[in-house]
Amino acid sequence: LPYQIAVIPGDGIGKEVMPEGLRVLRAAAARFGIALALREIEWASCDWYQVHGEMMPADWKAQLQGCDALLFGAVGWPATVPDHISLWGSLLKFRREFDQYINLRPARLFDGVPCPLVDRQGRPRQPGEIDMLIVRENTEGEYTNLGGVMFAGTEREFVIQESVYTRIGAERVLRYAFEQARQRRRRHLTVATKSNGIAISMPWWDALAAEVALDYPEVTVDRQHIDILTARFVLQPERFDVVVATNLFGDILSDLGPACTGTIGLAPSANLNPDRRFPSLFEPVHGSAPDIYGRNIANPIAMIWSAALLLDFLTRGEGAGRAAHDAILRAIEAVLREGPHTPDLGGDADTTRIGQAIAERVVAG
Ligand code: NAI
Ligand code: MG
């Protein structure tokens, strides 16, 4: 039976990078004998909102019944729909309703990509010096709507917004991060915390991390306060392997990490429901980029890498899916090293050309 994939291009450059993601996905699936049934969906876009007055149909969940994964471009067109409506009306619904509690965001410096970071001697960072995996808690923590503004407009005005960490929620993301660390060469895990300032929930989070660590003696762990951790991302990125963080801290780190590796146009992400009770969602970290949309110059590599993560997850990191993922990554590495490049990397190739170059290498092996 083929894997059922819902394909949601969304808005702006989502519509330009998705065809290249699909081109490479199809090439890899064909080469490694993975049967896919792709279904393109036009809702979860601002175009659809313009006609229907909402981002998704009321029966969106029923329409996605039976699908194994979602491949998502980007959503948002601020000229016609406010960002909080487009985002909360689509992507954030998927993350929460499908319990995609892991947000996985690799950040890696590639050969051929100019790095904005330098070492203490002022030399640009080299590939191999930045290779990290950020594991962000994706459904709870600081992002809640528990709270409100009281006595607005009076001198007694105040606002409260609660953070919520459940034992189940924190423990499952910690375990997931330890598992990832265990499978990597360096077997190192950094726990992002802030237990000096946030004196109740963060020591609780630290204690839980220490408890889970007992089950992973082969993984070295260090705990860092989020403020110095962000400084070290920039100054000493080679210290990091896997980094686990709460929703807010992880959100910040997972934009900073890719920024340290040259261009946001490379950064992929996986929003996972590891229990597989619900479909997982794979998308580039970047948004719809209205400033460059329509010229076909967006870098499609974040989208293509996201498709590789999808294949790997579908087949549980084994067999054909893992081989397809690795083949796509090797093709991406080769194209970054030898060109062609899109303008964000200083080149003049268009989106389609990059997709074709990567697909050709996937086919050639
Ligand atoms: P953005 O990621 O769309 O763009 C930021 C900057 O990076 C822009 O200068 C853009 O041209 C550049 N850029 C982004 N992706 C690129 C690529 N693949 N190749 C080359 N350059 C690239 O973020 P921005 O401008 O803050 O948001 C624009 C819209 O996207 C908003 O509506 C926002 O809400 C939405 N958005 C959606 C996300 C999603 O669907 N997951 C994530 C972030 C933003
Ligand atoms: Mg963010």
Image (cartoon, grey):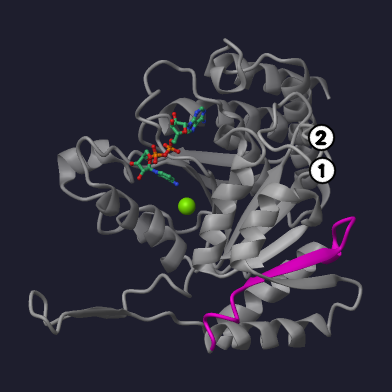
What residue range appears in magenta? 182-199
Residue under label 1: 129
Q: Nearer the viewer, residue 64 or 106?
A: 106
In the displayed structure, does residue 162 sit left or right of residue 122? left
Q: Residues within 10 Å of mark 1 (few under 14, many from 20)?
A: some
Could you say which quadrant of the image residue 295 lies in? Answer: top left
Residue 45 percent location from the top left of the image: 31, 41
- Badge 1 amino acid: Glu
Mark 1 to mark 2 CA distance (whole Å): 6 Å
Relative vertical location of residue 47 with respect to residue 216 in this rendering, above or below: above
Q: Nearer the viewer, residue 257 or 93?
A: 257
Q: Residue at x 58, y 82 (%)?
A: 202
Q: Residue at x 11, y 76 (%)?
A: 152
- For the residues labelled 1 and 2, say whether their Cβ atoms are less than 8 Å apart: yes
Task: Count all numbered tags in the image, as a single digit.
Answer: 2
Taking the magenta stretch, the answer to whether it contains residue 266 is no
Judged by its main secondary structure, the magenta piece is loop
